[in-house]
Image: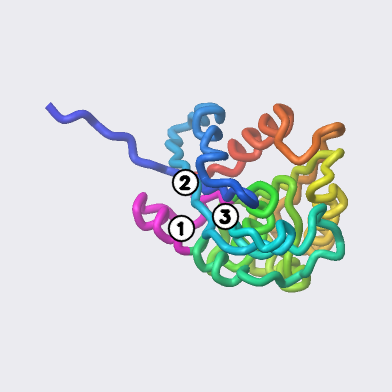
Amino acid sequence: MSVPTTKITNAIIFVHGLGDSGRGWSFLESSMPDFGKGRKVSYTFPDAPNQPVACNGGMVMPSWFDIKAIPVDAREPDDPAGIDASVSAIHRVIDDVIAHHDLEPKNVILGGFSQGGAMSLMAGSLYPRPLGGVVCLSGWLLRKDLNVQAWSSTHSSVPLFIGHGGADQVVLTGLGSEAAERIGKGREGVEGAAPVTFKVYPGEGHGACNDELRDLAKFFDSSLIT
């Protein structure tokens, strides 16, 4: 007798930060709640390629694009080397997940931490069709004008969650605030525009505290549509 299988209805793709791997964030799969309502979620944690990174003296490590200096602040280049190849790589991951589970883009949430959060905002804004949601934890906005324009027009229906530690000394908190403010302003007056949720976690450094993970679960729950 065959055992019935439950079809995947949604997917979460989460992108790691500099020097990490997909495995570093795979705990999300077991720590997120059962979202219920007939939803069955698959999780994917892609790995960045190994390449030299300027902020670490040219050392080769997992990295989605080059970073000039730590802490990342307003002086960081807006259009870093390697970003186009990584956007294409993440788009391929999204395409593969959609094809494998027979999903629509609206059933997929893309998220990331730090460098991966910056990548999620970038790749999400350039994906050909709007996704179900995008998350940026402790990240920042790249190619600001292009990014804001996409989030305010063709992708204005995509809900965004931007979270940042209030004591982050690796990616300064002001960069997360700037991303939320610029995208939020761009969406003002746009019919049908989804909310941009921004939260700061006082005392939290460059990481994700329990309160932030709880807020992340709430965002997933509200954005996982079937």
Question: What amino acid type should be assigned to the residue bearing mark 3?
Answer: Pro
Residue at 79% over, 59% down: 69
Is residue 75 among what the camera can see? yes
120 over 209 or under it: above or below: below
Q: Which residue is mark 1?
A: 93
Residue at 70% over, 45% down: 137
| Residue 218 among magenta residues | no
| Residue 94 among magenta residues | yes
Q: Secondary structure at mark 1?
A: helix
Q: Earlier in the sequence, mark 2 or mark 1?
A: 2
Q: Is residue 2 left or right of residue 35?
A: left
Q: Are marks 2 and 1 in contact (CB under 8 Å)?
A: yes
Residue positioned most to the left: 1
Q: Nearer the viewer, mark 3 or mark 2?
A: 3
Q: Is residue 2 left or right of residue 152?
A: left
Residue at 56% over, 56% down: 131
